[in-house]
Image (spheres, rainbow, N blue to C red):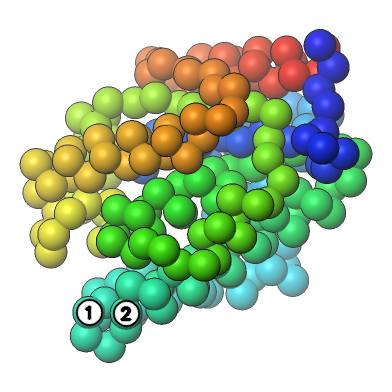
Amino acid sequence: MTMSSTAGGPRFCVLLGPDYAGKSSVLAELAGEVSPWHFVSVDAAWLAPEHRLLADLRRHLVHEVLPRVGNAYSDEFVAGLLQLAVLHLRDRVLAAGDTPVLVDSYYYKILAKCRLAGVHGNPMFAWWRSFPQPTRVIYLDIAPETGWRRCGAGAEVNPLEFYGDRPDWPRFEAYQTDLRKVMLDETAHLPVTFVAEQDSVARTAALVREALADELR
């Protein structure tokens, strides 16, 4: 089946997964090949020079805003900053025109994290859900134990990756388990291809590549 746009909109798929699932590594692996797909992410390595502001905002969010939530900044203020990333992803999807796009997380992961932070009923969430929808979500499904190992047993986490005020294993596991549930809830209306945890980035990328090839048939 040939990949078609949603209601005449852009053609795109979403690469989704919990924290430390390896989405950036998979995108880098795929980008090293000749591909009809355009790749979109807010990770610094994928931002054009004119969009470097997003990298600066992300750094300030992690190091200056998140540690002061509940004191200097509200949860809604954090959601407002995250909206800039959401809008960038949407804008890049729309700008691709007829080129098929693989986008990192889209708004689904950010919305899930807002929900887990207790930010409910914000009008902008309904706006996000009105954005163009992908033809497929490709979900990198890793165990929380794998994420914990990849983040150095909590050494590299930020406050939007665990519950509470310190990153121990029980709080990380609980958060990542809930994050998976909420992300899948947000994408329940879409076709989802699950890619089970693999022993290498190359093998994970190969399975993602297969799913993308199916979308272009």
Q: Please, what is the three-letter code of the amino acid marked with disc 2? A: Ser
Q: Mark 1 points at which residue?
A: 70
Question: Which circle marks residue 74 in the picture?
Answer: 2
- 72 or 4: which is nearer to us? 4
Q: How many marks?
A: 2
Q: In this view, does 15 lie above or below 88?
A: above
- Percent position of residue 53, x then y: 61, 74
Q: In this view, does 20 lie above or below 72?
A: above
Left or right placement of residue 61 versus residue 91 in this view: left
| Number of residues whose C-alpha sits closer than 10 Å to that of mark 1, classed few (under 14), some (14–19) or many (20 or more) | few
Query: Residue at 59% of width from left, 15% of height from top?
Result: 206
Instruction: Identify the image quadrant of the N terminus.
Output: top right
Q: Residue furthest bottom?
A: 72
Query: Residue at 39% of width from left, 24% of height from top?
Result: 141
Secondary structure of the residue carrying tag 1 is: loop
What whole-number distance in Å separates the C-alpha atoms at marks 1 and 2? 5 Å
Left or right placement of residue 214 versus residue 184 in this view: right
- Percent position of residue 123, x then y: 52, 67
Secondary structure of the residue carrying tag 2 is: loop
Query: Residue at 48% of width from left, 18% of height from top?
Result: 194
Dividing the picture into quadrants, the one containing residue 100 is: top right
Q: In this view, does 6 lie above or below 142?
A: below
Instruction: Identify the image quadrant of the C terminus.
Output: top right
- 158 or 160: which is nearer to us? 160
- 133 or 60: which is nearer to us? 133
- Percent position of residue 105, x then y: 54, 43
